[in-house]
Image: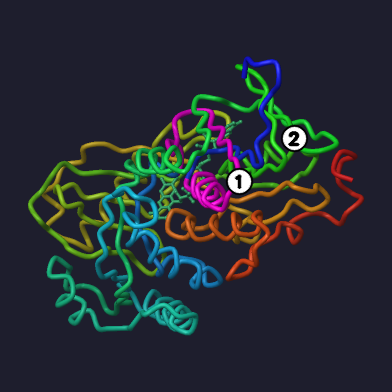
Amino acid sequence: MGSAVMQEYDLGVIGGGVHGCTAALFAARGGLRVALLERGPLCREASGVNAGTLTLQMTRLALIPYALRAHAMWASAPQWLGHDVGVVVCDGLSLAFTEAEAELLAFRATKRREAGAPIDLISGRAAMAVEPGLTDRALLAGHCRVDGFANAYLTGLAFRRALLGAGVAVMENRPVTSLAREERGFTALTPTGPVRFRRVLLAGGVWIEPMLRWLGVELPIKVLVNQLVVTERVRPVMRCVVGIANGLLSLKQYPHGTVVVGGGWQGEGDRERGGVALLPERVVGNLRLACHAIPALRGARMARAWAGLEAETADALPAAGPIPGIPDAYVCGSVHSGYTSGPYIARLVAEHILGREPALPLFPIDRLLPPRGTQSPEAA
Ligand SMILES: Cc1cc2nc3c(=O)[nH]c(=O)nc-3n(C[C@H](O)[C@H](O)[C@H](O)COP(=O)(O)OP(=O)(O)OC[C@H]3O[C@@H](n4cnc5c(N)ncnc54)[C@H](O)[C@@H]3O)c2cc1C
């Protein structure tokens, strides 16, 4: 900002993934003047390279009510976002191949059904009627009618247009190097000049940990390095989202024919360097599992594989709410299956910032922090 009087925004959102973008959008629509600062292009980290599965079967139990509402948001993206992110709503199957997996599946499905997810347990044979491409080796399947997937690559494009339309000052390629607390508000330092705001929302994915450190708050955020594989375009081989009970597979075919294979197989990388290496034996393990579930995939060639960083707190529940001890500062992220649930949770955080009562509880980070007084002095 080159002018003599620096503009002050009502809210500065740092981090332009699905959480930061959604919160910025709803805060702006609620009447705040919002600046969104992203060090690269919008949604090019986890929110742009993920598998796009909109799943209840792999979502943490406590997040099912959030994921159900978020699924409805994704399914109606053209209405609230104004742009298409290639959402396909379809059935989902979570498979069990062994007795132990069947036991795990039955437990998980029952708990999720109690929490409101429409999941039925069906036999392997009945699952083949739902998904004709399926192997005949499954013993049991969790069948969820509320499943589907999006094209994560389109997320940033869709949000950029929506945010600009809502009047958000979208500052891409604008890394924040530090954040200073002032008597009234915050100043974010960036290589191209400072940006001032009255309130701040940290939405930095795995980088929430260093962001919170700017405010003297130490919150360990675990970094998962998830590998993904996409095949060449193949003839239609499946029509559902397919996973397995232990979570090590997620599989679906996009309308243009490619099949995305994931399941959280870990590659190498870290917060500083990103995903730097795929572990070939794990790529092969993941693909073997995919071919076991959908045998027609045996003829498909792998086109590309990559790794992205997913954030997780110590209890695997979100960091979403006010930052204790720092008035007007908030955090939003570390949501398990965060692409699925992210829009709804970030919308709740925006509601809170707007002074409205969120429809479902937030996930304040107090539970994850050491008792007050033991943090560094800035946080006191
Ligand atoms: C490979 C992979 C597959 C996945 N598959 C699924 C799936 O199928 N379904 C599902 O529901 N979830 C999935 N997830 C999880 C999901 O992608 C994430 O939970 C979600 O996208 C996180 O969104 P976010 O906005 O919190 O973080 P991010 O999308 O990581 O956004 C954080 C942003 O902060 C920016 N940033 C960092 N530091 C700074 C700074 N100093 N200044 C400015 N900006 C900064 C980053 O550039 C980044 O854009 C997957 C994750 C990965 C990695």
Q: Is residue 278 left or right of residue 298?
A: right
Magenta part of the chain:
18-46
Residue 240 in the image: state x and y as whole percent: 22, 65
Q: Is residue 22 above or below residue 245?
A: above
**Where does residue 294 sit, x and y in percent of width and height?**
18, 61
Q: How many marks?
A: 2
**For the point 64% across and 55% down, which residue is it?**
354
Q: Position of residue 36 (x, y in %)?
A: 55, 36
Compared across the picture, whether 215 is left or right of 201 comes to right
Q: Secondary structure at mark 1?
A: loop
> The N terminus lies in which quarter of the figure?
top right
User: What residue lies at 61% left-to-right and 66% top-to-bottom?
Assistant: 358
Give the class, few, some or many, for how many residues have Cα within 10 Å of label 1's Cα (few <14, many ≥20): some
Magenta stretch: includes residue 45: yes
Expressed as whole percent of the image width and height from the top left, the position of residue 242 reads 28, 64
Q: Is residue 135 left or right of residue 38?
A: left
Q: Is ligand 1 less than 8 Å from the beta carbon at label 2?
A: no
Q: Is residue 49 above or below residue 189?
A: below
Q: Earlier in the sequence, mark 2 or mark 1?
A: 1
Under mark 2, the amino acid is Phe
Q: Which picture quadrant has residue 43?
A: top left
Residue 54 versus residue 58: which sits nearer the camera?
54
Q: 240 or 33: nearer the eye?
A: 33
C-alpha span from label 2 to label 1: 16 Å
Q: Circle 1 is placed at which residue position?
A: 32
Q: Is residue 330 above or below residue 6?
A: below
- Of residue 231 and residue 346, the one placed in the foreground of this image is 346
Residue 339 is one of the magenta-drawn residues = no
- Look at the numbered discs 2 and 1 and tell me whether their residues touch, using CB distance below 8 Å: no
Q: Which mark is residue 186?
A: 2
